[in-house]
Each structure stands twice: as structure tokens, then as C-alpha cells.
Image (cartoon, coloured by chain):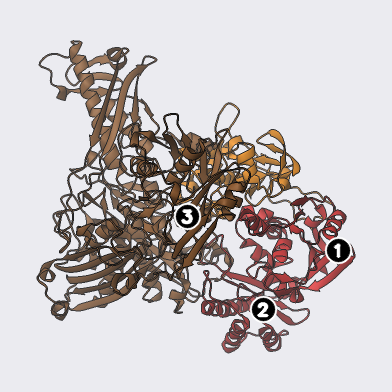
Chain colours: A red, B orange, C brown
Amino acid sequence: MEFLSPATWEEALAAKSAHPDAVPIMGGTDVMVELNFDQHRPSALLDLTRVAELAEWGPDGSRVRLGAGVSYTTIIQRLGKHAPALAQAARTVASPQIRNRGTVGGNLGGASPAGDSHPPLLAADAVIELASVHGVRHVAAREFYLGPRRTARRDDELIAAVLLPERAGPQHFCKIGTRNAMVIAVASFCVTLDAATRTAGTGIGSAGPTPLRAVAAEEFLTAEFDWQGAGPLSEAAVRHFGELVASAARPIDDVRGSADYRKHALSVMARRALSWSVTDYRKGEAQCA
Amino acid sequence: MSRISLKVDGVRYDDDVDPRTLLVHHLREHLGKVGTVVGCDTTNCGACTVLMGGKSVKSCTVLAAQADGQEIETVEGLAGKDGSLHPVQQAFHDSHALQCGYCTPGMIMAAVDLLAENPEPTDDEVREGLEGNLCRCTGYQNIVRAVQDAAAVMRAEVPAPRDAGTEPMEGTRGTTSPAAEEVAR
Amino acid sequence: MADSVTRTRTDLSSVTQDGVGTSPRRPDGTLKVTGEFAYSSDMWMEDMLWGMTLRSPHPHARIHGIDTTEALKLPGVHAVLTHEDVPGEKLYGLELRDQPVLAFDKVRYKGEAVAVVAADHPETARRALDRITVDYEVLEPVSDGRRAAFDEHCPRVHEEGSLPVHEEYNQKGNLVRYQPVRTGSFADGTPVSRLRAQAGAVVRTEYEVGMQDQAFLGPESGMAVPAEDGGVDLYVATQWLHVDQGQIAPALGLPDEKVRLTLAGVGGAFGAREDLSMQIHACMLALRTGRPVKVVYNREESFVGHVHRHPAKMRFEHGARSDGTLLYATLEIILDGGAYASSTPAVVGVASSLGIGPYEVPNVAVDAYGVYTNNPPCGAMRGFGAVQACFGYESQMDKLAEKLGMHPVELRIKNAMAQGSKIITGQVVDMPLPMAEMLRRARDMPMPPARDELPDPSDLRTLPGGVANTSHGEGVVRGVGYGVGLKNICYSEGFDDYSTARVRMEAIGGEPSVMVHTAAAEVGQGLVTIKGQIARTELGVERVTVHPSDTRVGSAGSSSASRQSYMTGGAVKLACEAVRERVFALARERGLVGAGHSDELLSLTGGKVVSETDGVLASLADLLGSDAVEETREFHHRTTRPLDPLHGQGASHTQFAMCVHRAVVDVDVDLGLVKVVALDAVQDVGKVLHPQQLAGQIQGGATQGLGLALMEEIQVEESVIRNPSFTDYLIPTILDTPPMRIEVLERPDPNAPYGLRGAGEPPTLSSTPAIVAAVRDATGRDLTHAPVRPEDIVGIDV
């Protein structure tokens, strides 16, 4: 097995082009376990931890560009204002040691439906920046997840960054685990209210073959919510939103929880996250973005 | 094989490693640094925690080759040259914060990182900082106490803890990571 | 501090520096905090090989052939061994020899060892395993414990006639042991209906306890080194060196003395190291190759490499008079022992004899079954047999209390045992058992602040779900629950689990010093500290060294059953007393003690022989000169008796111990998530030997009980483990574990050294039902399965 350790982004893209089956690794949480257990013997590993550009982040026009190699620790410390749901999700990733190493890029590369960053990226309508020696292209997170651990990334491409729309309203992420730390999501949920576009966004984790959106729930909320006056939603509307979120999920029974529980939990989380979001919105938090 | 150069506990090692080799296995099997132990193979237990570039990492999630050029600090490098224990080591010993001791190397390294970030943590903050380290023996009570005792000793030793709340930076472009300097003790 | 230890009675006869009753630091502590402590996985020798194990992929299959040809061809492979290469006895076992060293004819559980390989590199060994071909005929597994117990047509896990016969176990079909207990009118065959008719309240429930894993952090490992005399030296992490030796030597076809064991650093045990894992395999490979062989399991292998806590299916019926007085109880307890017996007979013995717990019940019928299935083998884990029963009887107490409108503590006190009570086997509790007082103390401990009294109730860290942000207070309900557990200490049913200690006193560098040598396994519990404390107290000498544990001294028995302070502590005390007598005799020989001066008036204090009347007679250093005084003693606990196989009567236990827990939880009743807010304990330990270590035992034991209450279960489907990793087998983290207040009582047991009582297991019994009761209190749900799953709380069928 070859170990490729490019020092620059150009070198990294060239390496990926020359070795399309090379497995890119950053923090390595997923990849390493597979290597260790011999479940996976890639012909080459492409270590991206030395590519300094990947660890950069900052404003990019109206968006925030988050390098694929920015650690969860940095996201928690620095991006709480720009991407509160993603920061909240980052806070629930594993443990400090893993958050020091783990990255959103790695989460996207592995594309496990349980990855904690996916629901916030879906809900916030983030865009994934993919690059190869042939150039850069942008794929909406909402188009990115194709199947179980399958994504829109081509073999010769690397994930360069995530583009987060400037926040224009409240966002909430919640995650169920059966203990209070270091746990893979049994189910997770994210909701965003975007005052600028007057649309709602959602993201569901660990409740289907891929991270999911609850499109009907988004449409319902976009139509139902009083974007102007920020009037309260009726209890029935909140409940209906929860049901729509649950019905968008396609969970299975597994060791971490039953499908029925996942649906139930999603409906509860959806109701709560929506209520918190509406409260925040009414507090005028929408304006602070 | 990849040629790597590591500084581990202050000593430089140059070796050829199989790219698949995990840092923890390299430390244990090639460098004889068996003080860092393996508990779970799946990045959960935290027993293999070391500091890399001053930050705590689980050394089962780092390839040895990825650590090339890095400075690694393990539990074996904490004590002074005269054998005097690091305040965190001393506190774990004094407070009976260990039984079988298998989690201890990782727990201590995580605590060292935690205290570098936050020299005066609350009990809740200690717990948060150690959430990635499993202990099966103690029920954690004495571990919290030991970290608090160590924090008190370290605060007394270092009169001016670094300023923790200065940098509302807008992005990192064009700047270098401050991480290494920040956590240097 | 919230987790401080309150000692309610202090009776420290000893004032010796670092003696009994004080909290000296662990002698192995410095090594453990510096990373220098050598765990069994840390050993290394220049020419060593790596051993690895090929395991069955099927829970039940016939083996038609094993072909190792291709594996042997691989460069770097030094040996590939199968059952044909086992030099001696092909079966071993802790209580019944029913487990193959390497499988032959059949495999009976997924993960059973079939072949072993030694190679110069782990990677080579792994590749060699891939090249071994085993011809399996897959058979349907016996997966249901109830079926194994009762269905006459259920296939046999072990062929008829193939097992060692124990008449007293009522063996039949797949039953490893069936133990009934009958008292009161049940002894005469009175049907339960007659008692039921007299009861003011009856509760009848089926409970399940999931398969719990000990989840020690240091996986199985060790190194075998071939010796010039044709024997082998084994360095291993285990709980009982001599019982390992007694199983390894016959398998190797060697006399015991040629199989020498030394305890390597143990990364936790909790029962999982009672059975053999890699011991015989490593020795076989070392003897075959003539090279040291190291074996280290990874975590996944560890999950199939050791036994687990027996999962239990239990049907409990309790009847009480309207005033709350218990009238009768009937219990059916099925313990799934999996493919091999391991400790199953003893587990059944405990579950049956302690099945109704510490309550006075005049009429009791218990039927406890231990069965063979093709599930993962189960055996010892902290509190075995008693943990499962305790979840059942404590849940029943809460249900009865609710039905009768009584406070759960009140009902328990009303029916509490005390000194002089008889347990259902007829055995009298002839030692203090201040249960009622303990319950009152637990009830009266200060409560943690209510949610609205918190400095910041919106702090996510105070809420169930924590920073995962599932609730800002919505759906959160507080509950309080109690649990009491009664545990036997030391081995039971006629087993003489004696311990041996060798104590040597000599003057080194002009200072008296003592060496304590036992074979007892230090598994983390701190026995290594206790041994030194006892020697200091008994011999008045500060400099005490604890010799590494090995088989060069007699057996110490197992580090199990909360017994080592009692048994090895007792042996060290005895050996010290013998040394002391010899020192007194020496002093007399030298004419330092007057003829009429009784030994009673002599003591060893501060390194001197001191007379109560005449003051210092001599310094030990002067008295000993260049002589050493060495004595070896065995300590035996009192004789216990087997349970009779018909009515389960007999004084089977050595000692009883008790812990009471009060749990306070916050439950998100909509999501089924729980945060334990407080887990406070009252325990009677007879005598505190080391306050700090004792607290560690109680807190650690309680935390394992917390795990069983809320998250820990090896999920087995069709006899296959579905979650063999710490990713999906969850144990409590530091954020799941609340501050724990402890009150310790010291009511001495006159039979025990210093009056002490084993302390490690009782908290593991009581914390589980206390927490589940608290969750019931918050939710109103039945909650009959431990661990409680979120589904159970929100009311979704699993």
C-alpha cells in the first residue's frame, strides 16, 4: 500500500488524479478502524493533514467557506455565530481527542448516514466544493448524498470545502444517543429558519440509508410560518411538522435502536427544535445575522 | 514503507514504517513505548491518548506516517528528569484516581490537555474534558478530584495562566495556526 | 464534597503509619501513573512469536475437517495447532470440564477457538489464519434459554453422556444445574393458590436481565516462555493463578510444577478473567516452537474470548398481607449459561439461595435453572447470580409498595432481615445486618438540588441528552428509587477457597523490613495496598514490600466474590501473627523478656518489641541480626455446606454483605433518555481497611450497576453477538456518572479478620434496581428489562 502525503493542494489533486482509488484521510476516525480491522485494504492512502489550505476558513462573498480540513474543535470555538447548528453538531462528535482531529471533510467523504455534520449541512443548504486537476465544481449538500456511503464525489475528486450560506435565522441541531457522551447518533435532526429566503430547512441523520431531508416538512413550514410577524405556530402545526419529519425518515432496526423509536424520536426532536427556533426568531435573532 | 521522523517525549526517532501502522502500534512495538496502551481498537476508550503538537489525540486514529515531523508526548515523558511526577500524575496517585490503571495513561494525557486549555475548570468542565476516556474501575469520582487537585497545584506553580479569551478571529486565511504555542506549558 | 465518605463509626485500633484503617497510596501507583507498569500486553522478548486464534464463524456446527497445510507454508509461520496437537486433556473448565482447548467434532458458539497459529509478526499470523480451511456442517443453534430448560425435544448442546455427572445439580437435558428451594408451606407441597387467597396484594411480573460484559479495559493477553526443564513459564493477567495452573497443566500433559505462572499487570477483571482465555494456547505454541509466544486479543476478540454475565429470564410472584407483611414468593429464574458451563453451577447456587433477597418471607418456592445453549458462554461477573435476582426482587418490592400505597422504604423496612434472621436456605445470618438502619440512612441523605434550584437549569449539561441538545427542559421528570442487595462473600456450598501467605521479616540496612508473598491477583481492587497495611499493623514495621504474585507460594484463591481482603487479608494476618510469635520467642531466647511476662503484654510497635509493662525491650533490627523469620500460613473460612438438591436447604454461605442505594434521575419521558443525578450509597463493611480504596470499590461497583440499568447489553440474535465493540456496547462515561455520596457503617462480623466484610460486589447489586426504580418513578412505566431502553420508556415494543 502506498502512502501519499502531499504538502500542497495542487499536489493533493495530482495525487488523487494519479490514484483515483486512493483513500483520502484526515482525522481518520472511520478509515483507521477499517484499516485496523483489515476490513479495507486500499491500494493507497492519501493523507491530507499536511495540506494547510484545507484547514482554513473565512468569509467567501456572502458565504462562509469552511475548508474540508477544519477540525471540529475549531468549528466549535470559531463558527458558533456563523453556523450554530453545525457547531452544535460538532460539539456532539465523539470526544475532545476526536474533535481535535475530525473534520467535516472526513464526515462527507465517509458519508455515513450517522455522520453528525450532515443534517446541519442539509438544513442550511450548504454547498460542497469538489476539486480535481480538471477544476472545481460545486454540489449542493442536498444533491450530494446518493446512496449508502455513496456521494456525488467522483473518484478523481477531493472535497475541498463546504460553503455555508450566511446565517439568516435560527438553527437547531439535536441528536439522540443512549448515553451522555461519545455516542453515535441513534437519530439526529436539524432545522433552520432562513429569514432572508423565507424558507425552512431540515436534515435528518441516522434514520435512512443516507442523510435525509424532510422536504414536505420544509414546504409545510415555509408556507405555514409567519415570516413577517413571527406569530407563534399552533400546537397542531408544530405537531404536524413533527409528523412530516418522522414520515420522511426511512430508518431500520439495528443495535442502536428500533425504526419505530427513531421515527418517534425524530417527531419529538422536530417539534422541540422548531419551537426553539420560533422562539429565537421571535426574539429577533433573525436580525442579528 | 514510509520514512518518518518523530520526536517522542523529547527524543527523536527516524524509522521506516508500513503506511498502515497506527501511531499507537508504532509507539508500542517499534519504539518500546508501551506506557501508552490499547483498549478498544475503535477510537472509543481513550486509553491510547497522547499529545500530538500539544493537542490530545487518540493514537489509534493517527497513522504513524501522518505523525511524521510531529512532536508526540506520552505519559512516559511527563515526569521530570529527576523522576518527580507531573502534578496530574501526582494527583492521580494521591487521590486514588486509578485502580487497574489501564485507562490512566490516556486519562492523564487528556487531563493535561484539558488543564492547558482551561487551568481553572469546574467539575462539569473536568467531566466534559474527559468524556472521551473510559474508566471501568473507579466510577470516575476520584478522577474528577485528582484533576481538580492537579489544577490547583499547577495554578500555584504557574502564576500567570495564559489569557484564554482574546482572539475573536475572523477566519484563518493567511495566518498560522496558533494551536501549538497556545498549549505549550 | 458531595462524594465524600462519611464514616459513622470509627474504631481504629491501629495507629500504625499506613496501617489498617488508613489510606496509604498504592504501591503500584507510581508505576501506573508514569506508564511503567507492565500490563500483560506490554511484555516483549527478543525472539518472541505472536500467537493468534482461529475462531468459529458459526454458533453451532459439526467440524468435518481442518486443513492447515496452506497456513504452514506461509513464511514466518512457526506453528499451526489444532485439537490434535493438544498434548494432554482436551477439555478444561472452571467447575465442569466440558470445554475443548481447541474445538473437535463440533463448535458450540460463535467465536469458539478452533486453531492457533504462531508467527513472527501479527500480520503474518493473521494471514495464516485466513489460510486454514475448516469444513463445517452448519447446525441450527439452540438460542432460547427457556426452550433449553423446558423443551424435551430441544436438541442437546452437549451430547448425552458426554458431560461430567453431578447428581446434586439435577442435570437433565440442557440443564447444567437446576436448584429448587422450598420453605414454609411450599415445603409440604401446598399450592400457591392457597397462599394467594390469603394475600392482600399480589404482584406477578416477568423480568429480563440482559447479557452484560465485564468490559475491563485491558484485553486478554499474556506471554508463555518455554523452559529448559520441558515446562513453561506463563506471564498472564488472571484472577486466580492456581486454578489456571490446575487447568493448563493437564491440558499440556505436564505436572503442575512444570507450569509456573506469574501474574502480569491486570487491566481490570470483574469476573471475566476467572475462565481461561489464551493461557493453554500460548503455552502449547511456546512448547511446540521452543520460543516465547505472546498473545494479545483485540476488543472484538475479547468479546468472544471471555464469558459474560448470564442473561436471565425471571418470573416472580410476591404476595403480601394488606399491612405490607410479605406472605409468600415464587420465583422462576432461567440463567442462560451459553455453550459451556463455566461458573453456571455456582451462579445458580447464588441466584437460588439469595433469590428473594434480604426479606423475611415465610413461604418461598424458588426454581433456578442454569442452561446450556449455543449462545456466548456466560460465567462470572461482579455479583453473579445475585445481580440478576436483585433486579427482580427489588422491582417486586416497589410494585408491592405501590399496590399497598406504602413508601418503598417503609415496605422494605417492614420486611427487612436483621441479625438472627434466616435466609431461605435455613442459614442463620449470624452477623450484623443493619438493613433497616441503612434504608433509613439512605432515605434521609440530603437530596440533590431540584432542577429549578440549579444555578442554571437551562445548562444542557444538567439535562438528559446533555450537550446533544435534545431538551431544554421539555419532558423532563425527576424520579427517586431505592435498591437493596444481599450478596454472599467468599465461595459457597462447601468450597474451601483458602488463601496462603508467606511473610518474612528481616533487618535490611539496619531497618526491620517485611516481605509479603501471596499468589493473590491484584486486578486493580487494591489488595496490594491492603496486604502491606495488614503487615504494618500486625508487625509494627513501616517498610513492607509486596512480592509479585506467582505460583511459588500456595493458592490464594480467586480475586472474586469480594473475598480477597477477607481471605488473603486473613492469610497475611495469620502469617504475620506467626512471625510475631517467633519474634517474641526469639526475644525470650535472648533473655529480653522476663519468665513470668506473658506474650499478651508484648507487641511489635515502631520497629521494636514493646512490653506493656516494661516499655521497649529491643529493636527488631538488633533482635533479628542477620536472621530472617519467615512463616507461611493458610487461612480458611468457616465450613459451608452444599444446598440439598430437593429443597435447597443448607448453610451454604460464608458471609453476607449489603449495600443500599438511592438513585435520583431526570428522565426525558418523551425521548426516553435518562440522566442520573445522584447515586448515593449506604454500605456496611464491618471494618474499613482503606477508606479511599473502599470508596473506589463502592463507586466503581455502582457505576457498573448504572451501566446495567441504562445502557449495557450484549445483543445476541440467533446466538450471534451484534455489538462486539465499544462503539456499540456502551459503558458509562464520566458524563453519565453522577457525584456519589457514600455512608459507610462498620459493624464487625465476629467471624472475619478485623470484622471486615467483602465490599466490591454489593453496590453492583443495589445500584441497578435503584436506578430503574427511579426511572419508573419518573415515568410510571413498568420497565421489566434491564437495561432500560429508550423504547421501554416511551412505550415502543422492542
Q: Which amino acid is tagged 3?
A: Val
Identified at 22% across, 49% down, the residue is C655
Q: For label 2, count other residues whose C-alpha is less than 10 Å away and answer few (under 14), some (14-19) or many (20+).
A: some
Q: Which of marks 3 and 1 is in front?
A: 3
- The residue beneath circle 1 is A132
Chain that bears disc 1: A
Judge left or right: residue A126 versus residue C581. right
Q: Quadrant of residue A243?
A: bottom right
How far is disc 2 from disc 1 in space, using C-alphas?
A: 44 Å
- The residue beneath circle 2 is A282
Tell me, yes or no, whether the two marked residues, 2 and 1, touch with CB atoms within 8 Å: no
Identified at 49% across, 75% down, the residue is C475
Q: From what the image shows, is residue C262 above or below residue A206?
A: above
Judge left or right: residue C228 versus residue C433. right
Query: In this view of the protein, can residue B137 be seen by the observer?
Result: no
Q: From what the image shows, is residue B31 above or below residue C406?
A: above
Q: Which amino acid is tagged 1?
A: Ser
In primary-sequence order, the first of circles 2 and 1 is: 1
How far is disc 3 from disc 1 in space, using C-alphas?
A: 49 Å
The image's mark for residue C114 is: 3
Q: Quadrant of residue C204?
A: bottom left
Chain that bears disc 2: A
Q: Which amino acid is tagged 2?
A: Arg
